[in-house]
Image (tube, rainbow, N blue to C red):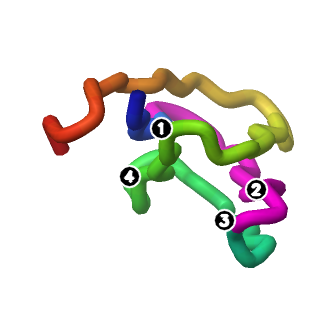
Amino acid sequence: MWGLIHVDQGELLYRITDARRPASEQQLAAGGDLGVVQPTIAHLVEITGPVRFWVEFFKAGSL
């Protein structure tokens, strides 16, 4: 399942930690870019302060 991380308030840190992908880090903030969560790819979400966010899930092939 694919996912999109939507931040409504505050910000969080989204990291790709999977050995099959280059390590990456993205600061997600309200009103900014969405975080794209790929199926089976290891990742971490770190709360960096007060935040409200949600994840929208999609079946593979529906994005």
Q: Nearer the viewer, mark 4 or mark 1?
A: 1
Of mark 2 and mark 1, the one earlier in the sequence is 1
Q: Quadrant of residue 43?
A: top right
Secondary-structure class at tag 1: strand
Of callouts 2 and 4, the N-terminal one: 2
Query: Is disc 3 placed on a helix, strand or loop?
Result: strand
Q: Which mark is residue 31?
A: 4
**Residue type highlighted by circle 4:** Gly
Front tag of 2 and 4 = 2
Question: Amino acid under label 3?
Answer: Gln
> Which span is picked out in magenta?
8-20
Count residues near mark 1 (Cα–Cα under 10 Å), then give few for <14, some for 14-19, many for 20+.
some
Residue 18 magenta-drawn? yes
Mark 1 lies on residue: 5
Q: Quadrant of the N terminus?
A: top left
Q: Amino acid at mark 2?
A: Arg
Q: Amino acid at mark 1?
A: Ile
Magenta-highlighted stretch: main secondary structure? strand
Q: Is residue 3 left or right of residue 59?
A: right
Quarter of the image containing the C terminus? top left
State the separation of the CA atoms marked 3 and 4. 14 Å
Q: Which residue is mark 2?
A: 15
User: Is 17 rendered above or below residue 6?
Assistant: below
